Image: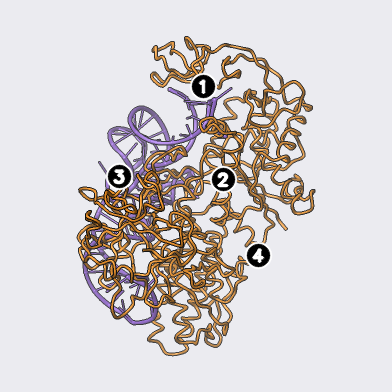
RNA sequence: AGCGGGGUAGGGUAGUCAGGUUAUCCCGACGGGCUCAUAACCCGUAGAUCCAUGGUUCAAAUCCAUGCCCCGCUACCA
């Protein structure tokens, strides 16, 4: 069996990964790995955190903590994000492991032995105060060209001329200002020119099928001449040299991090109980294709430096393809991980907090920067979920399955006698889609196959519409339903690499939970089995935005003039309760501008809260026994804005601070980080009828735990009465505030804000805790 | 500055290497239809000086030249 190695560029850990990293290299790698497994190949997919990068050390210095702390903090964050996104790593490790140290040091020694390393003496700036060598950019001084006193050792920001630290007048340490000295230091250089011929030979052998941009860039780089590159540096964070007498030096990250592909493979092998198993993928004579996915900033490392290291060491497999993507930017610039004050969620943990992983995967795949840079647009993100995933794909599943449920007792109907897949137009369409998708996926291209699958979705919808099974006699009717289910079943497989979670839900719905098992890619061509009972479940995708229409929600019917009201979703759920409507709650996000003690009460605060209105509102709240003023001031919290104004001990309260209570514990209701004051509940609008405290008490808002998906991938919530399936997709595990219906037994409805965020308790409280 | 990539309807995007009748597809807008389905689905219409200028050609989004804008590498950023 052919084997596939999937390497993913190693993220460095000075902040959480954002949607650009996902779209650019992690997701393509995962789609590819999932496809290859479905196609029956043996796959090894590894990556991990690059812990020894300078940004990690810099951030550690800024926070005055050891680099390990920063590295492991963000390693945990990234690993968790990837897990929740369903990135199917066989191992996601990091470079601060014993295995990696040993492997990297071993390669260093081998290259030294083989004569590919050379010791050279150079001069560098040195800070006597820090007692260490300074990176060029940490040396500052006066620019010799323009006189800028703050020029960096690598470049002057004022005249943009490139500089050497030696050229600066009065060089000093950027961190402490101490005058810098010049000292000599010894470093090991990797003699790339010695490997130029084997490298060219390698390029001739494989570059034929590389993407043109990767090939041209690489060829051009080599043509300009390879220079020896230093592979050690003066720093104390990283992998020590395996030699005596080099205590202050470490292996350079560019050299060491790429070795992670090999060390991670060895670690994976060790964990499987067969320490030699990595050779199945790294033996150059094994039937293996190695893929290294990454962004365009990393091309030379994977097409030149890493192959050169492997050639120098010898007897190891070389990359077969290096599918490098461009960047997914946000608003015209590369997303910087040091960016602060985000208006939209771009970091994976923030997105995962609010959205189903398949939605994030879909957007990233649909806008994958495969040919050129693309942009992340949050409005588009939400719109496309509704318009494409929910309306086209989700609804296709829903309409076909529910038709079979109502007309065929929830079983897959028999096709007419003599029906053949290859003779039906839809069957032919499926076969063509399957074949073309396979061709693209084999070439590590992803946008085309996704488009092809979506085209099949539309075709299935079209065929169903055109055939009018609701008005057709048998056997036409059962044929159309059968063919609809055929398309749904095939699409679950074809979309599996892209949308693994929802595809699994479809598989469950079809009563074939093992549909996405390895080797099943070809089963997309097979029709389903008549008579098999269909499962039940909520719609595949919940909508994030909903058109404002009269029956959607009673509360949205008033004052729909503001453009934001159009973004309203449902408050009452898909099936609004009949009879007396529960009170409409105008919950608004506000920022606490000020907190004062109430002059005449010892349990009350007088808060000044910015609700995004002309002036802040005065709200009296009885939370003084629970929270000191400093823990409230400046916080962003949820406020009931249509509370009838009421005087409390002489101060009129123009709203109500919402908080959940359990015994002595109290939690404020808070929106997702970054929510702006004035944000209301989805579907709500300003100017609702005011309600009294008694009416509010009947609203039945409680804390609910969102439980991790069980084996059937259904997200459940527990509002204190045992788990029930969630009516909408919620990030799990987490806690949200839900509104129970009158009986409190059917679907609890989470309080969803405009923009899709959910209100949650500021601190953990048990499920069922009441909001008062 | 040198090197590589990109600039196509309101947004996104294919086509560019191998030049050829009405420039692809998706979303949105507008109009119509259907009623099985999550007010979903289906059909149709409008909307593009293909970054600019010049050139080659019977014919240019496509080839050539120059310029403008964006991104990456060159750079102890990783």
Mark 3 and mark 4 in contact? Answer it, CB < 8 Å: no
Nearest to the observer: residue A422 or residue A55: A55
Instruction: Give how far across and how far down residue A260 sits, in percent.
Output: 67, 40
The color chain B is rendered in:
purple
Left or right: A273 as drawn, with respect to A698: right
Q: Is residue A82 visible?
A: yes
Point out the frontmost of discs 3 and 4.
3
Q: Is residue A609 visible?
A: no
Q: Which residue is denoted by mark 4 in the rendering?
A: A519
Q: Residue at x 50, y 87 (%)?
A: A409
* Chain of residue at mark 2: A
Disc 3 secondary structure class: strand
For the residues tagged 2 and 4, is the chain the same?
yes
Q: Residue A220, relative to residue A122: is it above or below? A: below
Mark 1 and mark 3 in contact? Answer it, CB < 8 Å: no
Separation of residues labelled 1 and 4 (CA atoms): 53 Å
Left or right: A22 as drawn, with respect to A96: left
For the residues tagged 3 and 4, is the chain the same?
yes
Q: Which residue is denoted by mark 1 in the rendering?
A: A138
Q: Residue A717, relative to residue A614: is it above or below? A: below
Separation of residues labelled 2 and 1 (CA atoms): 34 Å
Instruction: Give how far across and how far down residue A516 sits, in percent.
Output: 60, 67
Disc 1 secondary structure class: helix
First in sequence: mark 1 or mark 4?
1
Q: Which residue is denoted by mark 3 in the rendering?
A: A594
Q: Residue at x 66, y 53 (%)?
A: A90
First in sequence: mark 2 or mark 1?
1
Separation of residues labelled 2 and 4 (CA atoms): 24 Å
Mark 3 and mark 2 in contact? Answer it, CB < 8 Å: no
Q: Residue A651, relative to residue A699: is it above or below? A: above
Instruction: Give how far across and how far down residue B20 sits, in percent.
Output: 38, 51
First in sequence: mark 2 or mark 4?
2
């Amino acid at each position: 069996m052919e084997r596939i190695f999937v390497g993913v560029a190693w993220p460095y850990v000075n902040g959480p990964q954002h949607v650009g990293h996902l779209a650019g290299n992690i997701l393509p790698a995962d789609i590819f790995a999932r496809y290859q497994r479905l196609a029956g190949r043996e796959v090894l997919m590894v990556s991990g955190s690059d812990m020894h990068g300078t940004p990690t050390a810099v951030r550690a210095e800024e926070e005055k903590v050891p680099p390990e702390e920063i590295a492991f903090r963000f390693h945990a964050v990234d690993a968790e994000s990837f897990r929740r996104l369903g990135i199917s790593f066989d191992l996601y490790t990091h470079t601060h492991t014993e295995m990696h140290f040993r492997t990297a040091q071993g390669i260093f020694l081998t290259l030294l032995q083989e004569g590919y390393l050379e010791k050279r003496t150079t001069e560098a700036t040195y800070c006597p105060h820090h007692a260490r060598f300074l990176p060029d950019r940490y040396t500052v001084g006066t620019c010799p060209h323009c006189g800028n006193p703050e020029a960096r050792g690598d470049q002057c920001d004022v005249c943009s001329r490139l500089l050497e630290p030696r050229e600066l007048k009065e060089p000093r340490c950027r961190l402490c200002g101490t005058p810098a000295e010049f000292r000599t230091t010894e470093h090991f250089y990797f003699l790339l020119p010695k490997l130029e011929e084997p490298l060219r030979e390698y390029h001739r052998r494989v570059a034929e099928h590389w993407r043109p941009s990767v090939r041209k860039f690489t060829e051009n780089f080599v043509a300009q001449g390879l220079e020896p590159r230093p592979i050690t540096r003066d720093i104390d964070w990283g992998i020590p040299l395996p030699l005596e007498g080099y205590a202050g030096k470490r292996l350079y990250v560019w050299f060491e991090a790429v070795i992670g592909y090999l060390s991670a493979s060895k670690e994976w092998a060790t964990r499987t109980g067969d320490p030699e198993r990595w050779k199945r993928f790294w033996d150059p004579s094994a039937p293996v294709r190695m893929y290294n996915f990454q962004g365009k900033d990393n091309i030379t490392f994977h097409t030149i430096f890493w192959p050169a290291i492997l050639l120098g060491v010898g007897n190891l497999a070389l990359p077969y393809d290096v599918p490098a993507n461009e960047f997914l930017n946000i608003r015209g610039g590369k997303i910087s991980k040091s960016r602060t004050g985000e208006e939209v969620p771009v970091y994976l943990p923030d997105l995962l907090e609010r959205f189903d992983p398949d939605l994030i995967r879909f957007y990233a795949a649909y806008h994958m920067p495969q040919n050129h840079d693309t942009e992340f647009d949050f409005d588009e993100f939400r719109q496309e979920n509704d318009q494409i995933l929910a309306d086209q794909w989700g609804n296709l599943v829903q309409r076909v399955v529910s038709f079979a449920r109502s007309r065929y007792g929830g079983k897959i109907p028999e096709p007419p006698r003599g029906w053949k897949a290859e003779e039906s137009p839809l069957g032919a369409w499926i076969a063509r889609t399957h074949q073309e998708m396979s061709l693209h996926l084999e070439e590590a291209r992803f946008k085309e196959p996704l488009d092809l699958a979506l085209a099949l979705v539309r075709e299935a919808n079209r065929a169903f519409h055109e055939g009018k099974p609701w008005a057709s006699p048998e056997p036409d009717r059962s044929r159309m339903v059968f063919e609809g289910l055929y398309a749904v079943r095939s699409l679950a497989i074809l979309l599996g690499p892209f949308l693994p979670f929802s595809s699994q839900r479809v598989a469950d719905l079809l009563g074939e939970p093992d549909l996405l098992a390895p080797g099943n890619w070809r089963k997309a061509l097979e029709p389903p089995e008549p008579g098999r009972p269909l499962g039940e479940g909520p719609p595949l995708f919940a909508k994030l935005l909903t058109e404002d229409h009269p029956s959607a929600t009673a509360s949205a019917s008033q004052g729909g003039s503001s453009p934001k009201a159009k973004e309203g979703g449902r408050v009452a759920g898909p099936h609004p309760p009949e009879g007396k409507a529960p009170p409409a709650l105008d919950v608004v996000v506000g920022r606490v501008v000020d907190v004062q003690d109430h002059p005449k009460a010892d349990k009350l605060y007088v808060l000044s809260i910015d609700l995004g209105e002309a002036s802040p509102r005065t709200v009296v709240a009885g939370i003084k026994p629970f929270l000191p003023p400093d823990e409230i001031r400046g916080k962003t919290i949820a406020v009931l804005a249509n509370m009838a104004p009421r005087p409390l001990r002489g101060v009129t309260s123009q709203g109500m601070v919402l908080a959940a209570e359990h015994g002595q514990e109290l939690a404020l209701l808070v929106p997702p980080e970054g929510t702006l004051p004035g944000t209301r509940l989805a579907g709500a609008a300003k100017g609702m009828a005011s309600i009294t405290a008694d009416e509010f008490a009947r609203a039945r808002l409680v804390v609910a735990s969102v439980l991790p998906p069980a084996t059937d991938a259904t997200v459940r919530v527990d509002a204190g009465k045992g788990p029930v399936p969630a009516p909408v997709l919620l990030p799990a595990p987490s806690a949200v505030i839900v509104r129970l219906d009158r009986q409190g037994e059917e679907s609890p409805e989470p309080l969803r804000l405009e923009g899709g965020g959910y209100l949650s308790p500021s601190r953990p409280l048990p499920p069922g805790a009441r909001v008062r």
